[in-house]
């Protein structure tokens, strides 16, 4: 009795039938072997202890012996070979099966800081056949460092900086303190209850800016970055770092040139 296979292969086989002058009858036992990746792209956040991505390879036929999956690194890859390892023992479709795996392990130490690199693989075939087809024969894996990030909490922000607004007398702040909360929105992403830690309220109340505007940032191994729009329609750009003592140093600048540096201390 034939094994029921993935419907995507049935669809693919029907496409082949429509493209050939001579009808191609799908036969999972003795038919033409066409191998594909199960997907065309993926991401691999790599923590310090390493991480592995499992890429599935599918075949239109099965065999009574193990079949080797043949993959090649494409010239368009930006990932250095030191950043990953492809397990040779994983490159197999087991006997009697339609699918196999390619295990790709990321090397935390070799991946550049604050950089996403891409490994591009081409699928040449399985079990000695070179017929991988053109459908899902290329796979791209984005890799980047992933560090632990635990920044949720209530902070006192102490801000120092200056405004460029002459209408309000070019106001400044010096160690201006304001309480904010930081909440997690994803593995590495956060929001700040007021992205400018009360400075706009301090400076721009005459314009009616008496409310908080939420900010956001991402933490990539202790380096912070983010951007959002204020109520004036200007974009605020944030950069910062997580310090060894647990404080945060955050610098922000808006489209008008106002700029502030703040130290956030968790309460």
Image (cartoon, helix red, strand yellow):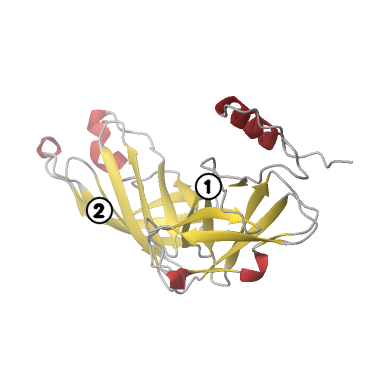
Whole-percent x and y of residue 90?
Answer: 66, 65
Q: Please give the name of the residue rendered at 31% of the width and 35% of the height, measured from the top-left corner.
A: 230
Of the two numbered discs 1 and 2 on the same chain, state the one appearing first in sequence: 1
95 or 264, nearer to the observer: 95
Circle 2 residues within 10 Å: few <14, some 14–19, many ≥20? many
The residue depicted at 28 percent of the width and 28 percent of the height is 208
Element under disc 1: loop
- The quadrant in which residue 94 appears is bottom right
Query: 99 or 232, which lies in front?
Result: 99
Q: Quadrant of residue 113?
A: bottom left
Answer with left or right where residue 64 lies relative to residue 67.
right
Q: Nearer the viewer, mark 1 or mark 2?
A: 1
Residue drawn at x 56%, y 48% is 132
Q: Which mark is residue 154?
A: none
Q: Which mark is residue 137?
A: 1
Give x and y (percent) for residue 256.
17, 40
- Residue 191 in the image: x percent, y percent? 46, 46
Task: Indicate whether 257 appears above or below 11.
Answer: below
Quarter of the image containing the N terminus?
A: top right
* Rendering coords of residue 231 (x, y %): 31, 31
- In 3D space, how far apart are the residues under numbered discs 1 and 2 (Cα atoms)? 50 Å
Tally of numbered tags = 2
On residue 260, the disc is 2
């Amino acid at each position: 009795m034939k094994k029921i296979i993935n419907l995507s292969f049935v669809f693919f086989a029907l496409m082949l039938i429509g493209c050939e002058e001579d009808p191609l009858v799908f036969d999972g036992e003795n038919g033409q072997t066409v191998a594909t990746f199960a997907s065309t792209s993926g991401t691999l956040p790599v923590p310090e202890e390493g991480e592995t991505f499992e890429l599935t390879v599918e075949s239109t036929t099965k065999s009574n012996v193990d079949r080797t999956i043949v993959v090649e690194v494409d010239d368009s890859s930006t990932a250095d070979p030191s950043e990953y390892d492809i397990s040779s023992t994983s490159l197999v479709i087991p006997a009697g099966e339609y699918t196999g795996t390619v295990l790709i392990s990321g090397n935390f130490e070799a991946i550049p800081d604050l950089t996403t690199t891409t490994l591009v693989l081409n699928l040449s075939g399985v079990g000695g056949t070179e017929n991988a087809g053109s459908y899902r024969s290329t796979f791209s894996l984005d890799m980047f460092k992933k560090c632990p990030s635990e920044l949720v909490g209530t902070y006192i922000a102490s801000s120092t900086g200056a405004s460029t607004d002459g209408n309000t007398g070019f106001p400044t702040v010096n160690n201006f303190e304001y309480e904010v909360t930081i909440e997690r929105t994803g593995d590495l992403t956060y929001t700040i209850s007021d992205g400018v830690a009360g400075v706009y309220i301090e400076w721009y109340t005459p314009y009616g800016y008496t409310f908080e505007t939420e900010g956001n940032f991402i933490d990539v191994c202790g380096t912070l970055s983010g951007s959002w729009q204020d109520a004036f329609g200007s974009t605020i750009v944030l950069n910062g770092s997580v310090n060894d003592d647990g404080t945060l140093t955050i610098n922000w600048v808006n489209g008008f040139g106002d700029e502030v540096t703040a130290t956030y201390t968790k309460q």
